[in-house]
Image (spheres, coloured by chain):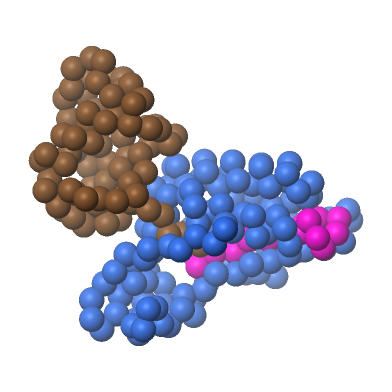
Chain colours: A brown, B blue
Amino acid sequence: MRICVRFFALYEDLIGRDEEVYFLKSGSKVGDIINLVVEKHESMKGANGMLIAINNTFVKLDTFLKDGDEVALLPPVSGG
Amino acid sequence: MIQITREDFSVDETIRKLRTDEMGAIATFVGVVRGESKGRKVDHIEVQAYEEMAIKQLQAIEKKAIEKFDVKSVTVIHRIGSLNVSENIMLITVGAGHRREAFDACRYILEQIKRMVPIWKKEYTPNGSYWVEEKHHD
C-alpha cells in the first residue's frame, strides 16, 4: 500500500519536510506507520499528544490503512 | 459561515451579515495576538492550518453549536499566516433569540476550536520561536 504521510507545525520543523511516502503491506494499521516514522526520524521519539487523521478524519492507532490514504500527523492544536 | 483566510476581517460587517429579525442577542469573541507570552515579548506569530480538515472540523462545530444551544446563526473566521501583535486572529459571532444561549454557544465554539481544529500558532520572540502549547479549561 502506498501511504502519504503529512507533517504539520512542530512535526514539520522536527522532520524538515511536510510530506513523505511510505509503502506498507496490506492489513497494516495506523500504529504501524507511526512506528515507521519514529524509526526513521529520531526527533519524533517522545512526540506527546499526537493526533492522527486519515483523509481529514481523526482516527486511532488500531485503524486499518487503505492504499492511497493520506495520514496526517498533528501536534496538539493551538488555534483560536 | 466558516472561513479560513489570510485577510483581516471586520467585526461590524460580519455582524451586519449575520443579523436577522429572530435575534435578540449577538455574542462576539475576537482573539488577538498578545504581545507577551510566558514572560517573553512576542514580536509576531505565524498561524498554520491543515486547511481542508480545519474547515471540516469548524463546520462540524458550527452545526453542533446550532443544534445544542438552539441558536440562529454562527460565523467563525480564522486567519492564517504572519500576524503582528494586536492583530485579529479569530472571530466568532453567534446570533440567538436570547443572551444566555448566545454566550453559551460562543464559549462552547471557542473551547471546541482549541481542542479539535488543526490550527497552530508559532510565537516569534527575541529569544527564538516557539510553537504554542494550549492549556484547556474544563
Q: In which quarter of the image is residue B47?
A: bottom left
**Visible in this render: residue B42?**
yes
A63 or A7: nearer the eye? A63
Left or right side of A66 for B96: right
Task: Note whether A73 is above or below B138 in the view shown.
Answer: above
Residue at the image point whose x is 79% and y is 46% from the top: B70
Q: In this view, does B61 lie to the left or right of A41?
A: right
At x 27%, y 46%, the residue is A7
Residue extending farthest front: B138
Quadrant of the image occupied by residue B107 = bottom right
Q: Could you tell me residue B131's position as x and y percent? A: 32, 64
Most foreground residue, B72 or B64: B64
Q: In this view, does B30 lie above or below A9?
A: below
Residue name at image x 73 percent, y 41 percent: B67
Q: Is residue A15 in view? A: no
Name the spot of residue A63 as percent of width and height, x first.
Answer: 36, 25
Residue B11 sits in which quadrant?
A: bottom right
- Residue B47 drawn in magenta: no
